Image: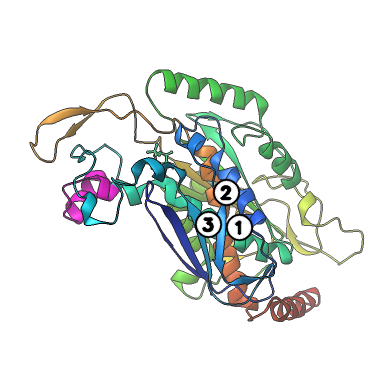
Amino acid sequence: MIRYLTAGESHGSSLTAILEGIPAGLSVKEDDINFDLARRQIGYGRGLRMGIEKDIVNITSGVRWGKTMGSPISMVIQNKDWEKWQAEMSISTQHEGKGIRLNRPRPGHADLAGAIKYNQRDIRNILERASARETACRVAVGAVAKCLLKEFGIKIISHVTEIGGIGISTQNLTPEDVYGRAEVSELRCIDDNAEREMKAKIDEAKVGGDSLGGVFEIVVTGVPVGLGTYAQWDKKLDGRIAYALMSIQAIKGVEIGLGFESARRWGSQVHDEIYYKSPSRDDKGLSEVPFDTEAQGSKPKEGFYRKTNNAGGIEGGISNGEHIIARAAMKPIPTLPKPLKSVDIDTKESFNASVERSDTCAVAAAGVIGEAVVAIEIANTFLEKFGGDSVEEIRRNYEGYLNYIKNY
Ligand code: EPS
């Protein structure tokens, strides 16, 4: 079972993650993690802060000579912006009172509810930890989970399907196509026309002192049938993915497969019919199958398969062997230059909240964070089923299971 904790404030000295439960013998390089950290930092519409930071991980335990030892892995990411915040974010009483006390909560942030809950009169004590800066840690942990999944042919990709009401119209692409296009797009968007419109809308938001949200999609390929279970509520794979995605800052909705659309249709238009093909050598593998929900005419696969994937690869809380598809909706970033009404926590007087520096749109970055948190859930359910203390032990368990499935 993988467990992890993150610590650190947005303008504190550094962020820290401790990850437990990764088996011994897994190849993990700082470069693997830095690759995803860099992907999280880019995206059209990101603010000035990303020009200051260059997120690089320092693994401080759990890895020796490039391989995990089975002990907890700790990782540290420095905040470059801390240079300017040393007194304001100091842990020492000698700096007490430095900086401006924040008493004006921003609508849409954790500011007011957090200040009341923790009995704080300086809202900085709330916003520093509530900030999405924390997600750099989750991406680092997710990158290690991805290293494990890669050993077993499981891949995770993300792309942006909607920003500010502008959606993509590309269909029937394979996961490889989607990955290729998303990685070279500034918005991680696979539809060039939609991307152009999205960028124009982000520019409009920036000029108007506003912000924009959107939707990203996660696709997981190579997942075997049988991860998660229907047997207990908190072990359902879809429930765990939804929880993980919903826990990302600013996420307001999660869908699996056809999601909310499935509530509007006849049952016969929703459920994926089951087919069977005898195992053969010329099978091209999962990655060539288009992942669109409702995709028709996908290449037959080995054993049991579906021609559509409205279930998003999960039935009864268990992976069914199809690609896992999840989407998350992100609200517009609440820190806006455009004034919104709020109330001063000291005087109780109304004022117009207005804040200068922030991102205009961070949906592309949120997709990379989504990949990370889904990777952790898939890795966790994978270890529950095939768990062992070393990669070799897990491989033996996994191969035995695959042989069993072939003869089922
Ligand atoms: C954030 C506000 C901005 C974002 C930040 C999240 O930071 P700042 O207040 O320093 O300008 O850039 O995101 C990150 C630092 C990051 O690494 O993603 C917020 O209030 O949540």
Q: CA distance from mark 3 to mark 1?
A: 9 Å
Q: Are marks 1 and 2 in contact (CB under 8 Å)?
A: yes
Mark 3 highlights which residue? Answer: 373
Q: CA distance from mark 2 to mark 3?
A: 13 Å
Relative to residue 333, is residue 237 drawn left or right?
A: right
Kind of residue indicated by mark 2? Leu
Q: Are marks 2 and 3 in contact (CB under 8 Å)?
A: no
Question: How far across and how far down the image is residue 391, in percent?
Answer: 70, 75
Query: For the magenta stretch, what is the residue range?
Result: 110-126
Q: Residue at x 50, y 30 (%)?
A: 45
- Lower position in the chain sequence, tag 2 or tag 3: 2
Kind of residue indicated by mark 1? Ala
Q: Quadrant of ligand 1?
A: top left
Q: Residues within 10 Å of mark 2 (few under 14, many from 20)?
A: many
Kindly state the secondary structure of the residue where label 1 is placed.
helix
- Lower position in the chain sequence, tag 1 or tag 2: 2
Asked if one can make out residue 243 in the rendered structure from this viewpoint, the answer is no
Question: How far across and how far down the image is residue 189, in percent?
Answer: 62, 34
Q: Give the label on residue 143, or none.
A: 1
Q: Nearer the viewer, mark 3 or mark 1?
A: 1
Residue closer to the observer: 321 or 271: 321
Residue closer to the observer: 402 or 311: 402
Q: Nearer the viewer, mark 2 or mark 3?
A: 2
Q: Residue at x 57, y 37 (%)?
A: 42
Kind of residue indicated by mark 3? Val
Q: Residue at x 67, y 44 (%)?
A: 292
Q: Are marks 3 and 1 in contact (CB under 8 Å)?
A: no
Compared to 226, does 331 lie above or below?
A: above
